Image (cartoon, grey):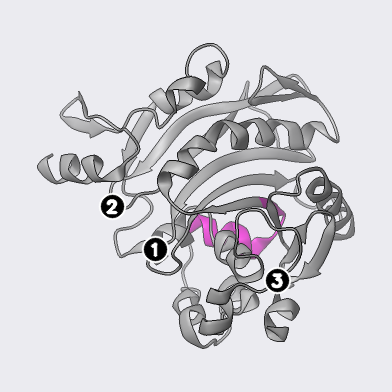
Amino acid sequence: MGNIKKKVSRLGFGFSILALAGCASAPAAMPESAQGQQYPTLQRALKNSDNTTRWGNNGQKDVILASVGPAPMVAASVGFDGSPSRFNAGEWAVTTGLSAAAIAFGAVASGVGGLFLGPSDTQHYPGLRDFQEGSCLYAVRLVKNEQDARRMIPEAATMAAKVPALFAGSVVGHTSWQHGGSVWEPHKMLWSGGTDSYEVVYQPNPDAATKKLSPVGIFGTELRPLVHKYAITDQWQWAFYNVPVSQQEADSQKISKAYPRWIFVLARHKQDPLVCVGGTCKTAGAHSKKS
């Protein structure tokens, strides 16, 4: 309990300690201005917080692989600042020789990319597994610190609902998406006690099969010491086998044009990730090799 309290006090998220059944739980990471009825489902989710060790305890690499997967690192390799206006390999990517393809698929790489050699058994790394299997779309914003990321949570949650509504269904309130009789809404927050990272989990209510594109979660990820940045990442799930990769690529380009301040990463099974910024898309692996 004491170690957890020390960790929570360091986060800078404004977390406090709640004693629940002998465990510490990290409550909402919400700016005061966003609390109240404006974002009711998001606020409920952030209050419904769980401490979890499911992201591993062997360092920041494990947290990234187990939660959101390599998407924030792929984004960092092709656009370093938080408001990309063009494709420009970041200083960090150049100096380390990072290959987006390597961190996605486990190829031998130099520099930091070598840290992401995929484990033979990925059952403990659901984020890496989802990325490798493809059919996931990610939107990433890279900011300086967790305070900036915290302020971005409502914007990320609003986008999580609006993106699938571009194709079907409708937005409920600000942060929930409704389609086919089900509502996908922020359900709870999973907080990694070993790092400064968290996930706001989306859950369909009532339960329903994945539609064309549905929200999975919002990740706040401390990338240090791998990268001196903090990442906010939205994740959506494409319907497996129902949406051709070519259609996913076209839709990703359309979505990125609507949200030019975000870096979109489309995970494609057995292919290099596709990265889109402001309606312009390039293959991440090919771009990294040019850097």
Please name the residue that numbered disc 3 is placed on.
88
Please name the residue that numbered disc 1 is placed on.
224
Q: Residue at x 66, y 69 (%)?
A: 78
Name the image quarter holding the N terminus: top left
Numbered-mark total: 3
* 247 in relation to 259, above or below: below
Q: Earlier in the sequence, mark 1 or mark 3?
A: 3
Identity of the amino acid at label 1?
Arg
- In the image, which disc is placed on residue 194? 2
Identity of the amino acid at label 3?
Asn
* In this rendering, position of residue 68 left or right of residue 211: left
CB contact under 8 Å: marks 2 and 1: no
Report how far apart the C-alphas of labels 2 and 1 lie in the structure. Answer: 13 Å
Q: Residues within 10 Å of mark 1 (few under 14, many from 20)?
A: few
> Camera-side residue: 77 or 143?
143
Q: Earlier in the sequence, mark 2 or mark 1?
A: 2
One can see residue 54 in this view: yes
- In the image, which disc is placed on residue 199? none
Report how far apart the C-alphas of labels 1 and 3 lie in the structure. Answer: 21 Å
The image shows residue 178 at horizontal and vertical percentages of 73, 23
Q: Secondary structure at mark 1?
A: loop
CB contact under 8 Å: marks 1 and 3: no
Q: Residue at x 68, y 83 (%)?
A: 291
* 169 in relation to 57, above or below: above
Q: Residues within 10 Å of mark 2 (few under 14, many from 20)?
A: many
Q: Which segment did they paint magenta?
A: 123-138
Report how far apart the C-alphas of labels 2 and 3 lie in the structure. Answer: 33 Å
* 30 in relation to 57, above or below: above
Q: Residue furthest top?
A: 37
* In this rendering, position of residue 94 left or right of residue 190: right
* In this rendering, position of residue 83 left or right of residue 7: right
